[in-house]
Amino acid sequence: MGLEEIIPAIFLIAVLVLVLPEFLRSNSKLKLFFKNFLIWVIIIVSILVIYNFVV
């Protein structure tokens, strides 16, 4: 695993650490949390599928 893979992974983890506490606090109700989580999963899966077709 080269540096070109490690640096983006570190940045993604840093963004997750910064965003996750506020995401959990704002989605205190379980139903709202799962709805927002599902939306994010759909967005991420869509980006990954498009990226795999392009590259």
Image: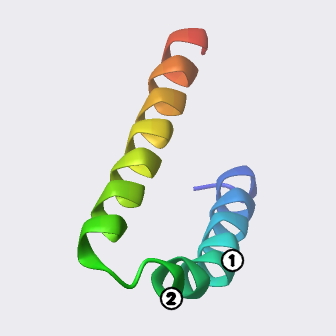
Which residue was labeled with disc 2? 25
Where in the figure is residue 49, as x and y percent of width and height? Answer: 45, 23
Eyeballing the image, is 9 above or below 23? above
C-beta proximity under 8 Å, tags 2 and 1 = no
Circle on res. 14: 1
Eyeballing the image, is 23 above or below 31? below
Three-letter residue code for mark 2: Arg
Question: What residue do we see at 53% from left, 18% from top?
Answer: 50
Which of pointers 2 and 1 lies earlier in the amino acid sequence?
Answer: 1
Three-letter residue code for mark 1: Ala
Measure how far apart labels 2 and 1 are at the Cα level: 18 Å
Q: Which of the 4 image quadrants contains residue 55?
A: top right
Q: Is disc 2 placed on a helix, strand or loop?
A: helix
Question: What residue do we see at 71% from left, 57% from top?
Answer: 8
Lateral position of residue 38 relative to residue 39, left or right: left
**Quadrant position of the N terminus in the picture:** bottom right
Where in the figure is residue 23, as x and y percent of width and height? Answer: 54, 76
Eyeballing the image, is 15 above or below 28? above
Where in the figure is residue 29, as x and y percent of width and height? Answer: 32, 80
Where in the figure is residue 48, as x and y percent of width and height? Answer: 49, 31
Nearer to us in this view, 53 or 27: 27
Numbered disc total: 2
